[in-house]
Amino acid sequence: MSCMNSTRRMPHPLLRIAIVGSGTAGPAAAIYLARAGHAVTLFERAPQKLPVGAGFMLQPTGMAVLHQLGLAEALRPHIATISKLYCRTKSGRVLLHLTYEELGSGFFGAGTHRATLLDILLEAVQQAGAEIFWNTHIAKLTRDATQRPMLHDATGTTHGPYDLLLICDGAHSTLRDQSGVPARVSRYPWGALWFIGQRTPEFDPQVLWQCVGSTRELTGFLPTGTQHDLLSLFWSIRLDHIDNWRQTPLEDWKRDILALAPQAESFLTQIDSHSQVATAAYHDVRMKHWHGERVAILGDAAHALSPQLGQGVNLALMDAAVLAQSLASYSLPEALAHYSRTRRSHLRFYQFATRWTTPFFQSDLLPLGWLRDLVFPIIQGIPPLRRQMTATKPWRTSSKNNARRVSGRFEEMLKSWEDPSAQENVSMVMAAAMATEAAAVPAVAAVMAAVAATIPAATAVTRAAVAAVPAVRGAVVGSAVAISSPVTAAVAIRGDA
């Protein structure tokens, strides 16, 4: 028995649990907790489940959670096998070229559609016996005389009291603000345009392909499932430019994309209306802990992060798994505290990495683009960092029994996923992920510290250019040129989770 197991208290009795939000964390938590025997009610403000969301990369920790839930096989027909990650500059310089085979035979990433995963999760929620209230906007949180949460929807109906409330309603959650758990939320000035269409032959079905110009130009193409052979297009854009984009002929926008990705000409013929292209605005959420009295916060409501590392869905799944494990092992107050402690150790790496990297790809700090083009090829050439950049992304399949395994330390710790001890193995995967990612922080920090030392000079260059050229001054008024550190400048971007 492990040290952690030996210090556990007896878990609490079965609970009446309310979950608000059906992105990723909410349904995953509902499955875990309903299967454990708790009385679970899931509230969602949308009138029904809708095919919303873009493509994303499923990572090893996320796959571990789906295996634990018994849902990985249902998703498998809908994934695209990603074998390479590629990013180049507009001029053709390669910033990133990683192949999963470097980690060993059989490793790959999994590209799929967010709506596909949601369909699978929600079906499992219903099968687990949880109750779902669609078209129910929970607008207010109060408490009864015993401090149990009471929920009030937009029609004035009261729900509750509940023994536990899980807040999973996204980065701009109003319930989080009413929960009493401190949070800092900022809206990032940059967002994205995205479109999902049929993949054309010019795009390799196994490659995540990206291209950058300056820090204001970024596009990417992600294979998003093989059943319908889809491809997701992403385009970086300032939020205050979206209205202007809607008034601009589509051909002008397509020319901008083709300047970075000439091979997209055939793919872009599928877009003939602005209404086909979705927009996404993002927020940065920072919290010191993710629980309060009889309340836990999960997913983007807890820790919205930049899509640069593609971790939003994976971290949301991890939230659900860790919370369920905590509730099964500790009394309610101890379980909530354990959830916060455990998630903090895992999130540390991703919060650090995304807040450093985002301004190099989405910002008005143009000199950071020059530094990015200089430094990132060097970073990927350093073996420990190169392995870390790849090892946090793939999962593995065994041709013998379709059992998944995970890279690096994970593989040594796992037996077949079909082994009776699979649940304990998943816990080991999660622990290994946390340890591996936390260990990477000092190495990444050292490289970024060297880059950061050049930022004041780069900022000074930008200021001088703005002062010297009136036309440039007008174009960048209100931009982030006065920001001295990308840690404070970068704001996490996320998809619904």
Image (cartoon, helix red, strand yellow):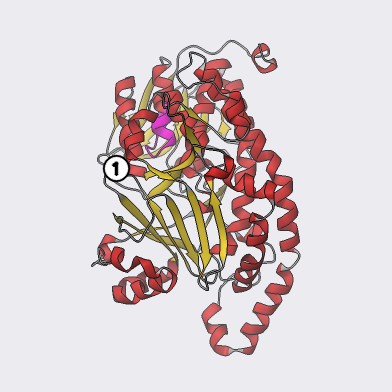
Relative to 99, does residue 191 appear above or below in the rendering? below
- Quadrant of the snapshot with the N terminus: top right
Q: Is residue 375 visible?
A: yes
Relative to 485, does residue 305 appear above or below in the rendering? above
Q: Residue at x 43, y 21 (%)?
A: 33
Q: Residue at x 68, y 39 (%)?
A: 438
- Label tally: 1
Residue 188 place in picture, x, y as percent = 51, 59
Relative to 102, does residue 17 appear above or below in the rendering? above
Q: Is residue 493 visible?
A: no
- Taking depth in this image into account, of 451 and 315 the one nearest to the observer is 451
Assign a secondary structure to mark 1: loop
Relative to 380, does residue 303 appear above or below in the rendering? above
Residue 108 place in picture, x, y as percent = 48, 41
Question: Is residue 110 rendered to the left or right of residue 471?
Answer: left
- Taking depth in this image into account, of 492 and 269 the one nearest to the observer is 269
Instruction: Give the amino acid type for the residue marked by disc 1 in the picture.
Output: Ala
Query: The magenta stretch spans which residues?
Result: 17-29
Check residue 25 for magenta coloring.
Answer: yes
- Taking depth in this image into account, of 339 and 230 the one nearest to the observer is 230
- Taking depth in this image into account, of 174 and 493 the one nearest to the observer is 493
Q: Residue at x 29, y 32 (%)?
A: 133
- Quadrant of the snapshot with the C terminus: top left
Tell me where residue 157 sits by quadrant: top left
Residue 320 place in picture, x, y as percent = 48, 30
Tell me where residue 137 sits by quadrant: top left
Residue 48 place in picture, x, y as percent = 25, 39
> How crowded is the residue under tag 1: few (<14 C-alpha within 10 Å), some, or many (20+)?
some
Residue with the mark numbered 1? 46
